[in-house]
């Protein structure tokens, strides 16, 4: 029972020069597009997440209320539902899946919005983590189309430290010889587990672990949290897909495209959307300081850190009700303005 | 030309119950022990460091001035000079080298100080990182012997988050099949390189990378820094030694011994030494908050963060002259008091 739809993109030429033939964009919608087509929210996915992983922020009485808004969740390339190493036919499958940028993603999402639905204005783009990075991309690439943005726990440009964190994640996964440069026939499970343990220290903050909050969420010990939550999380993912999205993340930059030609501050200044930018106060790889600088270059933006000890997970996926409330209230305020 | 000496410990029974037979403690001294034997400084080594890696803080005109003090650097068990997986004869070599605690280390160091040199009072114990952890151990285990302590960038107890960070480091190294559960015949170089890349994001802070400070220290690019500094660093180390010291680190706790029986606050309260505790302000795995709590439980201690963006490397090994000056001045002040 497939709960999503596929938008057929045809042959897509990427920024790298490679072509994905018969490319596919998987998406799911909530609510009804009104006649004026002015009730649209776009809500991209995060690293390794799929559309259903975004649903915690959607619901009756919430900012993203399907009774009021037409909410579109486009799946990021590489996430296993849209075109990915794991589902692209030969010869561009597995290790041959080409390098994809966030800008590539946004151009395809914009085609979905305009060609499939005939939408001209978007009331809000929002998202967590790499979803936040796509949100910034939307604001910079289509400033006349996007009225509001609310990126949370993500930056307009991947910081050097964030890049290094990802190098560690990648190195752990690819240290497993059974990864075999991507030509594995069985999952490189030791590498996936190693990647999970590396990620565990980055995903949540020092005070999250100091206060042992994992014990409140169904994990009986630290080791149980590392195995059940973290290793379980990554063992369910495809290694080449994870590496494809990791490459997309590492190259994240709203100015790395023909519009801005690397002028990062110009790209930020071009974002017309009214913005509330919400880093997690204790996020270790998207720290507030990067957003603070970005907001200082944006004409219509507010910097609003989430006062949370959940680290990167202040932004999702819906584990912590206090943070969900903070984000949801900010979205309500933004949509009402 | 061996620049250090070996103190023969005989058969040493560890906290775990295992025995290291004909155990060896490698050490180096600087300066001359005076007649009153009251000019003694003990300066333990850090994770994977050897005595010569400590020498940046010793010099004429510095707090640790060999013209004035008798400075003893004991090498930590597992570091390749004192008894370690790499130098212990069969059958306790390689993967069979037993689990060692920081308390085990301190007891042996205390034997060196008393049996070899007949010293009864120590003017100062100081050290970086795991050297700081040993410094705390000295203060708690021998409160009547240690007059001053100055731990920098290390805690009295390894925090849960710090433990998780180390799980990631370990998982990256051991994901390499050529590690072979420690029974390798050639170094598991892919695992050592993976470990290095994981460590790279933890060792320095977000602002260190944001400001690209590595470019000022002889590295031509980020990738050059990751290969030349980080991979080069760990490729020179033995994998089993690294894992042995990592286990020592993960179990670090000044109260995990027969004196305090797990009562951490009692162990802190028992430290009579006058203390200046110096975390790096931006240290990601020994964050200031843990030291702040520890200092609040110590009767005679000052919390003095190093105002640095060098992360954990605010404490060493002597790369950043501003931080060296901060630490050295604090040590001078402490020694004069």
Image (spheres, coloured by chain):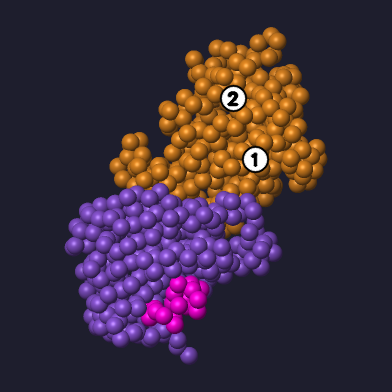
Chain colours: A orange, B purple
* Residue occupying image coordinates x 59% and y 25%: A28
Residue that mark 2 sits on: A28
> Which span of residues is magenta-colored?
B50-72
Quadrant that contains the C terminus of chain B: bottom left
- Whether the magenta-drawn stretch holds residue B66 is answered as yes
Residue B236 against residue A1 in the figure, above or below: below
Residue A242 against residue A43 in the figure, above or below: below
The answer to which quarter of the image holds residue B250 is: bottom left
Residue that mark 1 sits on: A293
* Chain letter, disc 1 residue: A
* Residue occupying image coordinates x 55% and y 16%: A66
* Residue occupying image coordinates x 40% and y 43%: A207
The answer to which quarter of the image holds residue B105 is: bottom left
Name the one closer to the observer, B207 or B199.
B207
The answer, for residue A209, to whether it is visible in the render is yes
Q: From the viewer's perspective, is B57 left or right of A112?
A: left
Q: Position of residue B300 (x, y in %)?
A: 30, 58
* Residue occupying image coordinates x 19% and y 62%: B259
Q: Badge 2: few (under 14), some or many (20 or more) residues near its Cα, within 10 Å?
A: some
* Chain letter, disc 2 residue: A
């Amino acid at each position: 029972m497939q709960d999503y739809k596929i938008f057929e993109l045809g042959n897509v030429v990427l920024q790298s020069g490679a072509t994905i033939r018969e490319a596919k964009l998987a998406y799911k919608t909530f609510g009804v597009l009104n006649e004026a087509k002015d009730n649209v929210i776009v809500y991209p996915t995060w690293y390794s997440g799929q559309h259903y992983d975004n649903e915690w922020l959607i619901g009756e009485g919430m900012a993203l209320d399907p009774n009021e808004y037409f909410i579109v969740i486009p799946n990021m390339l590489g996430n296993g539902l849209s075109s990915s190493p794991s589902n692209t036919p030969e010869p561009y499958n597995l290790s041959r899946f080409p390098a994809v940028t966030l800008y590539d993603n946004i151009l395809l999402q914009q085609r979905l919005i305009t060609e499939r639905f005939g939408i001209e204005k978007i009331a809000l783009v929002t998202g967590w983590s790499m979803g936040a990075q796509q949100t910034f991309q939307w604001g910079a690439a289509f400033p006349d189309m996007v009225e509001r943005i609310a990126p949370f726990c993500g930056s307009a440009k991947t910081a050097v430290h964030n890049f290094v964190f990802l190098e560690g994640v990648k190195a752990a996964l690819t240290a497993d010889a059974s990864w075999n440069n991507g030509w594995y026939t069985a999952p490189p499970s030791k590498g996936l587990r190693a990647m999970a343990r590396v990620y565990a220290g980055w995903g949540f903050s020092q005070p999250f672990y100091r206060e042992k909050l994992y014990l409140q969420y169904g994990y009986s010990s630290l080791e149980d949290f590392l195995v059940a939550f973290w290793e379980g999380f990554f063992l369910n993912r495809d290694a080449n897909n994870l590496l494809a999205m990791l490459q997309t993340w590492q190259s994240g930059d709203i100015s790395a495209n023909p519009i801005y030609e690397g002028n990062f501050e110009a790209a930020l200044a071009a974002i017309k959307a009214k913005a509330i930018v919400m880093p997690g106060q204790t996020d270790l790889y998207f720290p507030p300081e990067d957003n603070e600088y970005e907001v200082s270059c944006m004409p219509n933006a507010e910097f609003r850190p989430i006062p949370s000890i959940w680290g990167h997970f202040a932004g999702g996926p819906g584990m912590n009700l206090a943070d969900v409330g903070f984000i949801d209230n900010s979205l309500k305020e933004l949509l009402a303005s």
